[in-house]
Image (tube, helix red, strand yellow):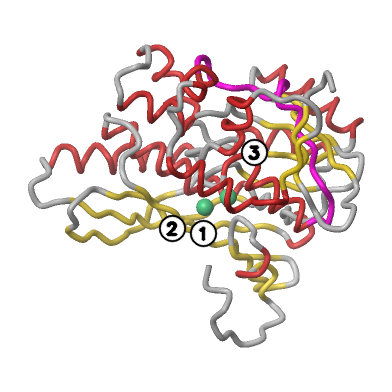
Amino acid sequence: MLSGLKSMPDPNILVGFDGKDDAAVYKVRDDLCIVHTMDFFPPVVDDPYDYGRIAAANAISDIYAMGATPLMALNILTFPGCLAPWVVKEILRGGNDKALEAGMNILGGHTIEDTEPKYGLSVIGIVHPDELLSNAGAQVGDQLILTKKIGTGIIATAVKADLVEPELEQEMNESMALLNKYALEIAKPHNIHSLTDVTGFGLVGHALEMAEGSEVSIKFYLDEIPYFDTAEEFASWGIIPAGAYHNRNFVGDKKVVEGEIIQAQEDLVFDPQTSGGLLIALSPEDAANALKDFEKAGHLAVIVGEVVPAEDEPKIILTTKGN
Ligand code: CO
Ligand code: CO
């Protein structure tokens, strides 16, 4: 965050540093906004093609999280000189395939040498100002739909320790490579109030951004959240990535626990996600209709919580359906 730095006033900046939103938004005309984001990270999986498509899906996701359509992208790539050329090619091929699936081309980029590979995209999208979706806008009484399973940080940590079955690893890779394009397309006709994607801050961290942006509190039912198989078990063994602890600190005392919850489930909602799903706030009626469309499309979607009034300040309430 560079929000402490100087900036100059510009009425066309609709979303900048202060909004804690997914991407920057600039209004270029009354009927057109540019949405701009970038993201890159070191390998999260062994296969270079998978890594490329996951990094790209993750970067493009912030465009969808604003309700926008991706238009074009640039590659950002670093790698050690000793890396075999075919590996670099596979990373770029994975990224390119995802960009094409998203309906855009990668028009260039920049590569430098570094001790470890890092890959991602800078993406530009467009949206009509009236269709812009942000962290703000969630209303008391809304339900929250989540569109991908939780636990990629914990499972990826367990993969490194050789504890994960190949089927589960494959399922997680496919989930991370899945574009949030489809979830946005399904939910969009149902009057989305607020939207974000679940990535590095974990489910609770990103929900807090939505809560603060919307001046509400958000209540999660931990027993309703879709977790990857065995993720709870791994969490209970203490297989938790460092990022989960940072996310806990980030949320701090804005987390409230109501009743009995399972510790491993709490660990999972702080787990940093790579290319996680969308978190969508809609009225209960719209949420019910959206769920039917998700089911028809064969796309995962689960109601994981609801929007409640913020008492003195926006908070995240962790509870279970039984409480
Ligand atoms: Co985001
Ligand atoms: Co991002």
Magenta stretch: residue 55 in it? no
Vertical position of residue 24 compared to residue 225: above or below: below
Q: Amino acid at mark 2?
A: Ser
How far apart are the two marked residues, 1 and 2, measured between alpha carbons?
A: 6 Å
Q: Nearer the viewer, mark 2 or mark 3?
A: 3
Tag 3 residue: 278
Main secondary structure of the magenta stretch: loop
Q: Position of residue 250 (x, y in %)?
A: 59, 53
- Would you call the spot at circle 1 few (<14 residues within 10 Å), some (14-19), or many (20 or more)? some
Residue nearest the viewer, comparing 227 with 278: 227
Do the CB atoms of the residues marked 1 and 2 lie less than 8 Å apart?
A: yes
Task: Indicate yes or no: mark 1 CB to ligand 2 under 8 Å.
Answer: yes
Q: Amino acid at mark 1?
A: Thr
Q: Quadrant of residue 6?
A: bottom right
How far apart are the two marked residues, 2 and 3, measured between alpha carbons?
A: 20 Å
Question: Could you tell me which secondary element the residue under label 3 belongs to?
Answer: strand
Residue nearest the viewer, comparing 246 with 77: 246
Q: Residue at 73% x, 22% y: name it.
A: 224
Q: Position of residue 223 (x, y in %)?
A: 71, 21
Q: Position of residue 303 (x, y in %)?
A: 77, 27
Magenta stretch: residue 222 in it? yes
Q: Residue at 57% x, 32% y: name it.
A: 267
How far apart are the two marked residues, 3 and 1, measured between alpha carbons?
A: 16 Å
Q: Residue at 67% x, 71% y: name it.
A: 27
Locate residue 278 relative to residue 120 in the image: left or right. Answer: right
Tag 2 residue: 122
Which badge, 1 or 2, comes first in the chain's sequence?
1
Tag 1 residue: 37
Q: What segment carries the magenta color?
A: 214-230
